[in-house]
Image (cartoon, helix red, strand yellow):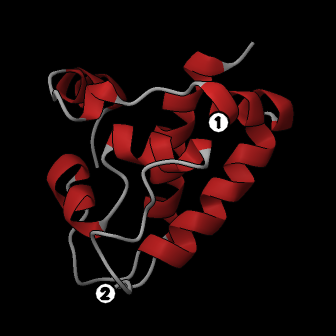
Amino acid sequence: MRDMDDLFAALSKSKFRSRFSLSGRELAYFRGKGPEVMKSHARDFVRQRLGPAYPAGDGRQTPLKNHPVFIAQHATGTCCRKCLEKWHHIPQGQPLDDEQIEYILEVIMHWLAHYED
């Protein structure tokens, strides 16, 4: 797992990661529901879609749109187990533990915080 400042400095240099932003329906949904609801959704998505050692459809389990958390996951490299290993040094092939899940939530919420009113 990485230091937030180092992580976001590295992510900002990625042309792919830095192209993601909230707008339209996703931004309205985020602002309407608020950060606590988003964190709850993120926790559910991370546990279900990333938590297992070998998630179903790994690499394709996180849509590119239709929910603020999905966009945040792509922006922060928390979208699949391969990206978790590359960007966050969380190894593949092992279930995520509670500390790793909380770290991933912190990363997602840090990115989403830029869109709060």
**Residue underneath mark 2:** 54
**Horizontal side of residue 87 vs 43, given as left or right:** left
| Residue 62 x/y as whole percent | 43, 62
Label 1 crowd (10 A; few <14 / some 14-19 / many >=20): some
Question: Quarter holding the C terminus?
Answer: top right
Q: Which one is in front, 26 or 14?
A: 26
Q: Amino acid at mark 1?
A: Glu
State if disc 1 and disc 2 touch (CB < 8 Å): no
Determine the secondary structure under disc 2.
Answer: loop
| Residue for point 45% across, 59% down | 63
| Residue 85 x/y as whole percent | 19, 60
Label 2 crowd (10 A; few <14 / some 14-19 / many >=20): some
Q: Could you tell which of marks 2 and 1 lies nearer the N-terminus?
A: 1
Where 115 falls versus 97 (above or below)? above
Q: Amino acid at mark 2?
A: Tyr
| Residue 66 x/y as whole percent | 59, 49
Where 6 falls versus 77 (above or below)? above
Q: Which one is in front, 97 or 117?
A: 117
Q: Which mark is residue 26?
A: 1
Q: Which mark is residue 59?
A: none
| Residue 33 x/y as whole percent | 83, 38
Q: Which one is in front, 15 or 55?
A: 15
**Horizontal side of residue 77 vs 25, given as left or right:** left
Where 92 falls versus 87 (above or below)? below
Where 24 falls versus 81 (above or below)? above
| Residue for point 79% across, 47% down | 37
Determine the secondary structure under disc 1.
Answer: helix
Which residue appears farthest toward the front when viewing the image? 24
Q: CA distance from mark 2 to mark 1?
A: 29 Å
**Horizontal side of residue 7 vs 15, given as left or right:** right
Q: Which one is in front, 14 or 4?
A: 14
Please give the count of numbered marks on the rendered protein: 2
